[in-house]
């Protein structure tokens, strides 16, 4: 199996006033192609920092982050932009759709900046929103908006799909549908999906679980037989 | 309460940059508006104060010598306040081996001068007991020689010494004064002590009228008062000749020059203020909207609505109040002063006296502050209507809608994706759209109007002197004789007389008639208001266009004129394009029918000489005893250009302020735009939009709206320009109602340049937006 993401002794410090806070303290882990990986931990543990640096939104102080063989910790700001553009599909907790664009157009945005060959309408169909293609975000429910957001991430045809609390703003049933969609993407399309969450329940559906505590990796669980989402309760 | 005050204090600090923007816009708007509005009144006031300080004469009586009896008689007339008789004559004096024509005013320096007091610019007043004759000289100006202090010469076998340079309130414009006895321009004006004169006679009497000080001397009511009283005096003393203050060259020129500034500074500021008020209101609304959360927090903490409201009222009062104070201070203090300094380059003006116009100041301050506070109250009130829990939740971003262009698939399908997004955004925030349109259209209009007024001034001069008047010189003669000096040139005899219009309205107009009704076409280019040429014929009755519009006369209308004790009624055949002066051109064949005697008193001459040769010819002509005055068209044109230059600098100032306004408004709107879209911008950055794509996303719509606004602004500017030109109320002066195409181009380019500047200024603002913003739950 191809190694898609590798964190090697990653250190990230934040300066708050005169105090230095170590948000990531020698974080190391690996994620393989096609895996559904859940990074879990209580708030303040440092998982958002992992999301930020893996998403190319922030730089690290020490260590290396290798994505598909490329060390992104050495990239310039400009190169980081291109990394975000071509290699990362991002799913936000609050969907972050462009309010002035229809569902279809929100997916087209991704295609436009990446020159991906995927057809936006096909992807919308895949997430079950073909009928809603011409609706604006304000006319869609939260779950539907999140599905558009996932469709947008898929449309980029990126190497990794990075999801920030994708079910955080959704109720239980809708959240399950979204997770089901993410699981199927990793399973059926061999996409690497990384979900960052504080929700322990989600870990059961993952191939790999990385637990974060006090800025460190406290435990890595490899799950060869993840549960189906329908068996999970939270 | 203490905690609340602390809160306000601390928060003011965080709101500081936004409130500062309000302070700046208000200051700019109030300052410029008030500064311009008070400019013309202050220009008048400074000279009026000078008139008052020097007890300027309301009129001068000439045509002496006057006996003591008549002087006393005039002095005791119930209309007269005071009289000041003196002796004045014109004669050549030696100045640096040359003869210069001097006007010698002989004054009794033993007593204080009571009317037209001399202001000492340099040196001192003459000592009447001195051995030599001490004199003072009128200060220099382009038509007067610069005589240095301490200069000694001999005159009338007496040694005279210049001990001072003075300023007489009747001489402050740079105009040529022609000697009536010598028929030449005066080059030195001297005030000498009586000891110069052997016997006492008086040739001039300065008079002041009772109650004249009640008027502002540059007001129409003063001129009406003056005319009425002097007309009465004239009837009682038909043998005397009265020169009213408003006939004084300096007064008349200043009145006319300031009149143009006045017209420009009337509409311009009103427009400017309107734009400022709207933009300030929008910015304040924006600030309150950003405070949603704050208001929610305060309310959930249990603060009462009134208390919360009072907090925002304090903010708006402080920012608009501070801006208003800065604006009043800066604008009222500097702008009239700057304009006055500009005028000082073409006039010998007294020092600037400022008057604070409390009516203007208070009206504008109240409008500005009230509009900001009102909009604040309304916006806060809107938030107070919502439940506190709603306020604590993020505001749902405004949703997109299909727009009308989408109904035209032909265009919509062809649009690039990013333009589709842009066009929807344009209509998503209607308020921003509306404000950008008003702000930019407004400032573009001001810019074009500014350039346009300059064009109108320039073109009026060009049309009058280059296109319409084809002759080079106008020679005034006291009897119709052969003038040998011009025999070789093309010339025509002209009959010129002042007539009175006897239609519904009474007005004075100059009647011009020519010895040859067909040859005159070589000297004057006759053309109508649309600049279509026509020929002067033996049936022509042509009035100039300002006179026509003033009395609402058009071709085919009848005008009744009283010329030399006859009243004749004629039908207007044409309206003449003309800018300075009110004339009626009547064919001599018509006047002869009415038995009007044509005493030719002018000659128009076409010379084809160079300017230098013309000057030589002019001097030669001035020595001819049958010639009373020689006017070179070049000189008139030069004088006009000087005035137009001073006006230009005022216009440049207006343009600069419009530009500043445009920049501040647009920059502010772009900031609002970026601020409203923080989340969208952060999201785009996470999605991997490159820097130029992000700024393009924000700026593209500003650019499209601005482009539309610039086009609207140009139309608006044309209208504003027309209104400014139309309200110029100076008798005998109209400007060309035209804007050069260069000005349109310049306005357009400048507006684009501003857009470019704003784009670069806004770049750091989008760069500053952190991607982490996209992950947050609300802003």
Image (cartoon, coloured by chain):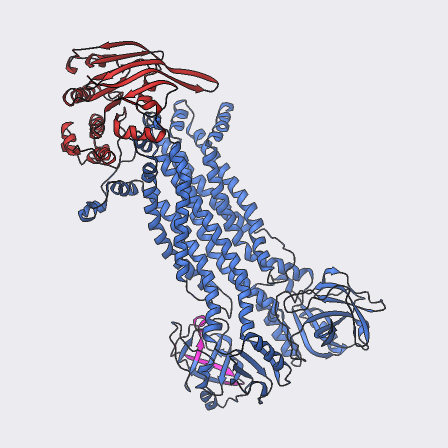
Chain colours: A red, B blue
Q: Is residue B79 left or right of residue A83?
A: right
Q: Is B711 rendered above or below residue A105?
A: below
- Nearer to us in this view, A66 or B145: A66
Asked if residue B557 is among those painted magenta in the image, a careful observer would answer: yes
Asked if residue B194 is among those painted magenta in the image, a careful observer would answer: no
Q: Is B684 rendered above or below residue A73?
A: below
- Nearer to us in this view, B501 or B409: B409
- Nearer to us in this view, B266 or A26: A26
Q: Is residue B617 left or right of residue B558?
A: right
Q: Is B49 rendered above or below residue A23?
A: below
**Residue B336 percent across, percent down from the top left:** 57, 53
Q: Is B587 rendered above or below residue B397?
A: below
Q: State which quadrant residue A107 falls in.
A: top left
Q: Which range is magenta?
A: B542-566
- Total marks in image: 0
Q: Is residue B483 visible?
A: no
- Nearer to us in this view, B398 or B492: B492
* Screen quadrant of the C terminus of chain B: top left
**Residue A145 percent across, percent down from the top left:** 22, 28
**Residue at point 47% right, 71% down?**
B579
């Amino acid at each position: 199996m191809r190694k898609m993401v590798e964190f090697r002794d990653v250190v990230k410090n934040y300066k708050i006033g005169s105090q230095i806070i170590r948000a990531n303290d020698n974080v190391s882990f690996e994620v393989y192609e096609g895996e559904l990986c859940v990074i879990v931990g209580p708030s303040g543990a440092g998982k958002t920092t992992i999301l930020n640096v893996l998403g190319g939104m922030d730089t690290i102080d020490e260590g290396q982050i290798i994505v598909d063989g490329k060390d992104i910790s050495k990239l310039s700001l400009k190169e980081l932009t291109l990394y975000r553009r071509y290699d990362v599909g991002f799913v936000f907790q609050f969907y972050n759709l462009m309010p002035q664009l229809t569902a279809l157009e929100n997916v087209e945005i991704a295609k436009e900046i990446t020159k991906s060959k995927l057809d936006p309408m096909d992807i919308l169909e895949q997430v079950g929103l073909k009928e809603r293609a011409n609706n604006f975000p304000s006319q869609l429910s939260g779950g539907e908006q999140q599905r558009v957001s996932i469709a947008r991430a898929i449309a980029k045809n990126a190497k990794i799909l990075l999801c920030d609390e994708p079910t955080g703003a959704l109720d239980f049933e809708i959240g399950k549908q979204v997770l089901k969609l993410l699981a199927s993407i990793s399973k059926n399309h061999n996409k690497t999906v990384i979900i960052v969450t504080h929700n322990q329940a989600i870990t059961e559906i993952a191939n790999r679980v990385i637990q974060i505590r006090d800025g460190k990796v406290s435990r890595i669980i490899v799950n060869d037989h993840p549960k189906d989402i329908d068996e999970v309760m939270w | 309460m203490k905690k609340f005050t602390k809160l306000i204090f601390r928060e003011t600090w965080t709101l500081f940059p936004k409130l500062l923007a309000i302070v700046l816009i208000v200051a700019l708007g109030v300052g410029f508006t008030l500064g311009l509005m008070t400019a013309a009144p202050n220009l008048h006031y400074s000279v009026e104060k000078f008139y008052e300080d020097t007890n300027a004469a309301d009129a001068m009586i000439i045509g002496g010598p006057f006996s003591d009896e008549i002087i006393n008689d005039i002095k005791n007339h119930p209309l007269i306040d005071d009289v000041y008789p003196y002796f004045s004559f014109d004669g050549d004096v030696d100045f640096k081996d040359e003869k210069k024509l001097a006007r010698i005013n002989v004054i009794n320096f033993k007593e204080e001068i009571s009317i037209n007091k001399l202001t000492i610019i340099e040196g001192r007043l003459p000592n009447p007991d001195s051995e030599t004759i001490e004199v003072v000289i009128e200060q220099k100006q382009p038509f007067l020689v610069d005589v240095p202090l301490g200069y000694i010469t001999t005159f009338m076998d007496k040694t005279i010494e210049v001990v001072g340079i003075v300023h007489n309130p009747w001489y402050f414009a740079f105009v040529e004064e022609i000697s009536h006895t010598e028929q030449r321009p005066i080059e030195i004006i001297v005030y000498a002590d009586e000891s110069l004169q052997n016997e006492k006679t008086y040739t001039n009497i300065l008079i002041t009228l009772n109650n004249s000080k009640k008027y502002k001397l540059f007001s129409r009511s003063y001129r009406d008062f003056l005319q009425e009283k002097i007309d009465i005096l004239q009837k009682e003393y038909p043998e005397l000749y009265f020169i009213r203050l408003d006939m004084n060259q300096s007064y008349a020129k200043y009145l006319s020059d300031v009149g143009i500034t006045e017209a420009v500074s009337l509409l311009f500021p009103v427009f400017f203020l309107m734009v400022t008020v709207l933009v300030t209101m929008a910015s304040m609304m924006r600030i309150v909207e950003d405070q949603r959360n704050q208001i929610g927090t305060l309310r959930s903490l249990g603060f009462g609505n009134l208390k919360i409201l009072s907090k925002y009222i304090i903010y708006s009062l402080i920012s608009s109040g501070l801006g208003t104070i800065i604006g009043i201070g800066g604008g009222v203090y500097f702008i009239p002063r700057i304009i006055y300094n500009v005028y000082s380059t073409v006039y010998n003006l007294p020092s600037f006296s400022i008057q604070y116009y409390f009516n203007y100041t208070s009206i504008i301050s109240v409008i500005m502050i009230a509009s900001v506070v009102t909009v604040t109250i309304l916006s806060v009130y809107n938030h107070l209507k919502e439940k506190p829990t709603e306020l604590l939740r993020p505001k749902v971003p405004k949703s997109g809608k299909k727009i009308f262009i989408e109904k035209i698939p032909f265009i919509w399908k062809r649009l690039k994706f990013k333009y589709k997004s842009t066009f929807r955004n344009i209509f998503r925030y209607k308020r921003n759209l509306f404000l950008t349109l008003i702000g930019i259209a407004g400032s573009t209009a001001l810019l074009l109007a500014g350039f346009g007024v300059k064009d109108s001034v320039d073109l009026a001069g060009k049309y009058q002197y280059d296109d319409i008047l084809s002759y080079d010189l106008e020679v005034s003669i006291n009897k119709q004789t052969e003038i040998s000096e011009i025999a070789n040139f093309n010339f025509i005899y002209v009959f010129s007389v002042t007539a009175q219009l006897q239609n519904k309205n009474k007005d004075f107009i100059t009647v011009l008639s020519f010895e040859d009704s067909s040859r005159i076409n070589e000297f004057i280019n006759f053309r109508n208001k649309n600049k279509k040429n026509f020929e002067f014929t033996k049936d022509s009755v042509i009035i100039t266009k300002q006179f026509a519009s003033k009395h609402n006369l058009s071709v085919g209308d009848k005008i009744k004129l009283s010329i030399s004790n006859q009243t004749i009624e004629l039908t207007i055949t044409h309206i003449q394009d003309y800018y300075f002066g009110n004339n009626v051109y009547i064919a001599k064949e018509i006047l002869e029918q009415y038995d009007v005697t044509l005493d030719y008193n002018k000659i128009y001459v076409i010379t084809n000489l160079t300017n230098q040769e013309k000057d030589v010819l002019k001097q030669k002509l001035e020595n001819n005893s049958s010639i009373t005055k020689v006017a070179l068209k070049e000189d008139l044109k030069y004088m006009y250009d000087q005035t137009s230059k001073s006006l230009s600098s005022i216009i440049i100032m207006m343009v600069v302020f419009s530009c500043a306004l445009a920049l501040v408004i647009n920059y502010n709107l772009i900031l609002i735009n970026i601020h409203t879209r923080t989340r969208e911008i952060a999201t785009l950055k996470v999605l991997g939009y490159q820097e130029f794509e992000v700024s393009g996303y924000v700026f593209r719509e500003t650019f499209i709206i601005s482009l539309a606004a610039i086009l609207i602004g140009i139309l608006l500017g044309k209208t504003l320009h027309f209104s400014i030109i139309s309200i110029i109320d100076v008798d005998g002066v109209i400007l060309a109602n035209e804007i050069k195409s260069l000005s349109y181009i310049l306005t357009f380019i400048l507006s684009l340049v501003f857009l470019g500047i704003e784009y670069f200024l806004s770049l750091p603002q989008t760069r500053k937006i952190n991607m982490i913003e996209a992950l947050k739950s609300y802003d």
